[in-house]
Amino acid sequence: MGLWELVDKVLIIFYKISGHPVFDYFLGTFLLALLAVVVGEFTISLVFLVNKNHLDRLNIQLANLQQLSMLALKLGDKKSYDACNKEANDTFGRVFFNMVGLSAAALWPAFFALAWMQLRFTGIEFPIPFTGLAVNYVFTFIICYILARMFFGRVKNRLPYFRGIHRMLMEYEKSSAPKIS
């Protein structure tokens, strides 16, 4: 049995809960989206833990460069100020793109979920009453994903692992925030 067959056997269970096809489709899609959200959040936490030392170094370097540029500005040394400011901007760019990468780590499970749904639900459409339009699995997944993200956002601080990670991220955010003196 291949990987996709195993994934299919597990995920299709979400779509056979009540025996009512339309209800099961929406419930299954919500549960699949919730699974994608949870796996994505777990991935973010792992990537953060792996990269924490690197991010710490970048934030320390950024704070030091900010202090040096302010000192150069106070001393009227325009050349040093420009050099420090340029280096600080480069470091800020590295911090920024590390954070963008961290945020993107949350999305990869959604693409795998959509790939699986494409195999199962291509060609199935739900008409929107009074419009003459219909939506497919991509639209319904996106709506369910948004709802699942909102739901998980409300409960994740009650889950032991995610509560600890959230606390760590909040402490990290406070400690790495630029300090203006």
Image: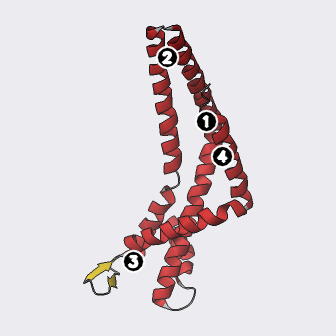
Q: Nearer the viewer, residue 32 or 13?
A: 32
Mark 3 vs mark 1, CA separation in Å: 46 Å
Kind of residue at disc 3: Phe
Kind of residue at disc 4: Leu
Which residue is tagged 2? Answer: 84
Mark 2 vs mark 3, CA separation in Å: 55 Å
Asked whether the viewer can see residue 1, the reply is no
Q: Earlier in the sequence, mark 2 or mark 3?
A: 2
Q: Earlier in the sequence, mark 4 or mark 2?
A: 2
Q: Earlier in the sequence, mark 4 or mark 1?
A: 4
Of badges 2 and 3, the one in the foreground is 2
Mark 2 vs mark 1, CA separation in Å: 19 Å
> Image height check: is 7 above or below 12?
above
Using a 10 Å C-alpha cutoff, classify the residue at mark 2 as few (fewer than 14 neighbours), some (14 to 19) or many (20 or more).
many
Mark 3 vs mark 4, CA separation in Å: 38 Å
Q: Which label belongs to residue 169?
A: 4
Q: Earlier in the sequence, mark 3 or mark 4?
A: 3
Q: Which label belongs to residue 177?
A: 1
Residue at left 63%, top 41%? Answer: 173
Name the side, left or right, on which 53 lies relative to 94: right
Kind of residue at disc 2: Cys
Which residue, as the protein is rendered here, is positioned at the far left? 132
Using a 10 Å C-alpha cutoff, classify the residue at mark 1 as few (fewer than 14 neighbours), some (14 to 19) or many (20 or more).
few
> Image height check: is 151 above or below 126?
above
Name the side, left or right, on which 79 lies relative to 166: left
